[in-house]
């Protein structure tokens, strides 16, 4: 698909033919070299964007560990079933066999796919599959290659949903810019009354459109006017999750029921209290996908027969409902089911395949003394891998579910795991040995970080610090000088312990607070501290809002070229190796500091997500955990 505007030229004075020729040759050369189209704003309301073939040039090549696919959106295209999710785009044959996979960070941008739509754009003669991303604009797929449609203003790239229309337009719901329309040649806001909205769902076309929002109910654009329906106009909840249209009726799903509109007017509420995540309307029935009740079928007329099972999918969240011919499909996070009007049950069409890891939302990484890789998850416990592609042992119980830090101890080969429900110790064989909570002397059950300190451990919690050693447990909190009770991260060098908190940094020696740093009494640029590591006799400090700062041995903070700025360092996501320092961020990939050249480089391309949450290093490889999976790369290959 080619979407490159022809440049227009003004009227030239006589005698300027040579200049015109030079300008034309230059333009042709730039077109040949760049092969990129930058659409300029020609009139009020248009949005500048670029269209380019999506090709990764020079990005680091990361090895990816397979994690369970998460299904969120599905669409039929060219006879195949395409399923999207955080992992990327999966191409299945009609019989459910996986044909191809396009992975985030490898074949696609490092951004979740949030919506799919088929459309023949006005400037094209063929149907394309449009992939909407969470923060990298749109991708147009013709079956072999991807074209990226990339608004220059970052706020227009944060997309929530897309639908195609019969006249070659793509309607785009965004997180903050409302509803946009794209015809292949230009981007623009559909109408001023539909701007500046956080859109969650779309149904209809550009002449008659229903727009769901996150907190303003549903808007109806029709005949050049917009009506808003919130709770005061009958909506059961201001948050809209799904919309379905049938004839003159519109059905709007919310967390507490479905609102029915007849000829543009609010009519009634059906399925009260049902968390309606997906809707599909027929002339006689409404099929409702729910958060925790599977699929429900509601008769809309007295004579209607129930064409589908009353319930399906168990207690799994239903992501989407759609029809292909007479068949109805239901998509869950792990399966795609199908039935037809005479079917009595849902039959599986696609099931996600096996994976190495248990989950993709990673919060902590570490190698123990035996070379085993421990992978902690935000909500799914732990995985223990004997080798990168070896068998996995999964651990999850009442204590091991939300993991914040994994600390292997050199002596004895034990592993301490900081979780949201205590501090858990594993023996050298990897068996759970002991779980410590507030009842055992911790100042709080929730453990945010743990480090080796003195003859034992220092344990960070939202209520202060606890020191553990063979003599027992002792705690330190704000009443005794800690700058803030909510401790997120700990850094240790010799007998000096730095506690990074919500309100600054406390320097601790022999379990006593020696001094504290805040934005009020030092050069610290942000009080919320997320990571601290010792480097070459000094400290590097990660913050939530100011990037990475240096702290020298005299207690002076200083900015780090290219690494200090208005961004967030992920909690405990900093690692020091003999050659580098790594800092993971929320939304910017990770930063690499070369300890030899003292230069910083940022790495984003090639990652499965730009949210980097954890690091580990072993045998020359760097392991990078994200909220969308685990990758590794030889450390020497990093820029």
Image: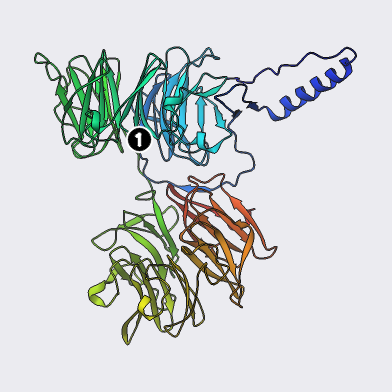
Say how many tags the image has.
1
Residue at 76% x, 15% y is 10
Residue at 37% x, 54% y is 391
Residue 63, image x, y percentages: 51, 48
Q: In this view, does 532 lie above or below 356?
A: below
Query: Is 544 positioned to the left or the right of 326 in the image?
Result: right
Name the quadrant containing residue 406.
Answer: bottom left
Query: Is 47 positioned to the left or the right of 173 in the image?
Result: right
Residue 34, image x, y percentages: 70, 30
Helix, strand, or loop for circle 1? loop
Seen from the viewer's position, the closer of residues 57 and 172 is 172
Residue at 79% x, 20% y is 24
Looking at this rendering, what residue extends furthest in the left direction?
302
Name the quadrant containing residue 421.
Answer: bottom left
Looking at this rendering, what residue extends furthest in the right direction?
15
Specify few, some or many for label 1: CA neighbours under 10 Å numbering under 14, 14-19, or 20 or more.
Answer: many
Residue to which mark 1 is pinned = 72
Looking at this rendering, what residue extends furthest in the bottom direction?
471
Work out whether residue 607 can be spotted.
Answer: yes
Residue 550, image x, y percentages: 59, 67
Q: Is residue 472 above or below residue 341?
A: below
Residue 425, image x, y percentages: 32, 71
Q: Which scheme is used to colour this image of the protein?
A: rainbow
Seen from the viewer's position, the closer of residues 316 and 384 is 316
Seen from the viewer's position, the closer of residues 45 and 378 is 45
Seen from the viewer's position, the closer of residues 196 and 347 is 196
Query: Is 497 positioned to the left or the right of 398 in the image?
Result: right
Work out whether residue 466 can be spotted.
Answer: no
Looking at this rendering, what residue extends furthest in the front direction?
232
Q: In which quarter of the image is the N terminus?
A: top right
């Amino acid at each position: 698909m080619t979407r490159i505007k022809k440049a227009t030229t003004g009227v030239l004075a006589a005698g300027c033919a040579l200049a015109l020729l030079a300008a034309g040759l230059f333009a042709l050369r730039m077109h040949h070299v760049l092969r990129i189209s930058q659409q300029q704003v020609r009139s009020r309301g248009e949005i500048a964007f670029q269209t380019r073939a999506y090709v990764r040039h020079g990005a680091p090549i990361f090895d990816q560990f397979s994690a369970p696919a998460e299904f969120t959106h599905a669409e039929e295209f060219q006879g195949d079933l395409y399923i999207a999710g955080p992992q990327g785009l999966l191409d299945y044959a009609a019989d459910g066999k996986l044909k191809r996979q396009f992975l985030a960070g490898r074949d696609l941008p490092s951004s979740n796919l949030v919506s799919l739509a088929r459309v023949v754009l006005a400037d094209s003669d063929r149907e394309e599959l449009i992939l909407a991303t969470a923060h990298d604009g749109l991708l147009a797929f013709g079956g072999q290659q991807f074209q990226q449609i990339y608004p220059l203003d970052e706020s227009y790239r944060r997309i929530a949903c897309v639908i195609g229309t019969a006249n070659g337009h793509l309607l785009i719901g965004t997180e903050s810019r409302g509803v946009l329309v794209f015809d292949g040649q230009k981007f623009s806001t559909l109408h001023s009354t539909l701007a500046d909205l956080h859109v969650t769902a779309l149904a209809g076309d550009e002449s008659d459109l229903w727009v769901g929002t996150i907190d303003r109910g549903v808007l109806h654009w029709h005949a050049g006017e917009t009506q808003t329906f919130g709770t005061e106009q009958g909506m059961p909840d201001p948050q809209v999750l799904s919309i379905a249209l049938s004839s003159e009726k519109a059905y709007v799903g919310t967390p507490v029921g479905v609102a029915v509109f007849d000829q543009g007017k609010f009519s009634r509420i059906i399925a009260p209290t049902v968390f309606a995540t997906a809707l599909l309307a027929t002339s006689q029935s409404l099929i409702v996908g729910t958060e925790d009740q599977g699929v429900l079928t509601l008769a809309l007329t007295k004579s209607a027969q129930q064409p589908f099972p009353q319930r399906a999918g168990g207690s799994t969240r239903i992501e989407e409902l759609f029809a292909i011919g007479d068949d109805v499909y239901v998509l869950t996070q792990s399966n795609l089911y199908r039935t037809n009007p005479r079917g009595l049950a849902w039959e599986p069409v696609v099931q996600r395949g096996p994976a190495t890891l248990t989950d993709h939302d990673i919060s902590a990484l570490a190698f123990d003394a035996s070379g085993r890789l421990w992978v902690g998850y935000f909500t799914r416990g732990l995985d223990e891998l004997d080798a990168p592609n070896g068998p996995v042992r999964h651990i999850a119980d009442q204590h091991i579910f939300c993991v914040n830090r994994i600390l292997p101890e050199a002596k004895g080969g034990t592993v301490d795991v900081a979780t949201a429900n205590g501090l858990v110790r594993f023996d050298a064989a990897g068996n759970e040995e002991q779980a410590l909570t507030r009842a055992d002397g911790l100042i709080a059950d929730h453990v945010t970080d743990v480090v080796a300190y003195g003859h034992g451990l220092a344990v960070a919690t939202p209520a202060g610090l606890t020191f553990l050693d063979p003599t027992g447990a002792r705690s330190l909190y704000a009443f005794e000088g800690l700058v803030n009770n909510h401790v997120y991260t700990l850094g240790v060098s010799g007998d000096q312990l730095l506690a990074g908190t919500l309100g600054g940094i406390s320097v601790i020696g022999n379990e006593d607070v020696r001094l504290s740093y805040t934005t009020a009494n030092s050069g610290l640029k942000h009080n919320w501290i997320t990571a601290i590591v010792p480097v070459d006799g000094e400290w590097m400090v990660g913050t939530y809002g100011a990037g990475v700062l240096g702290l020298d041995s005299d207690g002076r903070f200083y900015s780090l070229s290219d690494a200090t700025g208005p961004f967030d360092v992920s909690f405990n996501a900093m690692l020091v190796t003999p050659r580098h320092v790594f800092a993971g961020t929320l939304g910017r990939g990770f930063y690499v500091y070369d300890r030899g050249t003292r230069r910083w480089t940022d790495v984003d391309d090639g990652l499965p997500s730009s949210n980097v949450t954890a690091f580990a290093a072993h045998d020359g490889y760097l392991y990078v955990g994200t909220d969308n999976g685990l990758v590794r790369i030889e450390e020497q290959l990093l820029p």
